[in-house]
Image (spheres, helix red, strand yellow):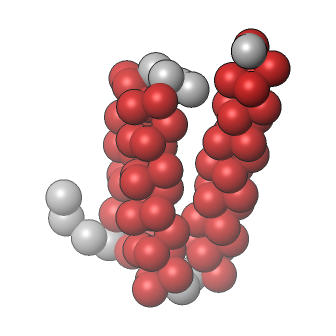
Amino acid sequence: MIRFKTNRNKRVKSHLKDVFKGFDAAIAEGDLDEAEACLAKAEKKLMQAAAKGTIHKNTASRKVSRMTIRFNTVFGKEG
């Protein structure tokens, strides 16, 4: 039974890493639309992972906050 939970957690964390990489790439390229889409997707995936217990809810919120701050810093948006 623990195998299934372990595999699910690995899969979810892998998806999160992919989303983070996409966000980082969009920030590096200066692509506002892509970065905004990746930020929204990351927030959704992080909250889903927190709801399932894969990561702690405070960890998810912290990551979203840091990504949002980074997005606003790069694209000059007030927050």
Q: Is residue 17 shown left or right of residue 3?
A: left
Q: Residue furthest front?
A: 1
**Farthest-out residue, top:** 2
Q: Residue at x 57, y 71 (%)?
A: 27
Q: Residue drawn 46% across and 63% down?
A: 41
Left/right placement of residue 52 relative to residue 10 reads: left
Seen from the viewer's position, the closer of residues 71 and 64 is 64
Horizontal relation, residue 38 to residue 21: left or right: left
- Identify the residue shown where x is 18% and y is 58%: 79
Tell me if residue 23 comes above or below residue 31 in the rendering: above
Q: Percent from the top left, x then y, of residue 1? A: 74, 15
Residue 33 position, x and y percent, is 44, 86
**Exactly how many numbered labels are in the figure?**
0
Give the answer, above or below, for where 65 lies relative to 3: below
Residue located 68% across and 52% down the image: 15
Q: Position of residue 20 (x, y in %)?
A: 63, 55
Quadrant hosting residue 64:
top left
Q: Position of residue 51 (x, y in %)?
A: 39, 31
Q: Looking at this view, name the residue that lies furthest to the left.
A: 79
Q: Nearer the viewer, residue 34 or 3?
A: 3
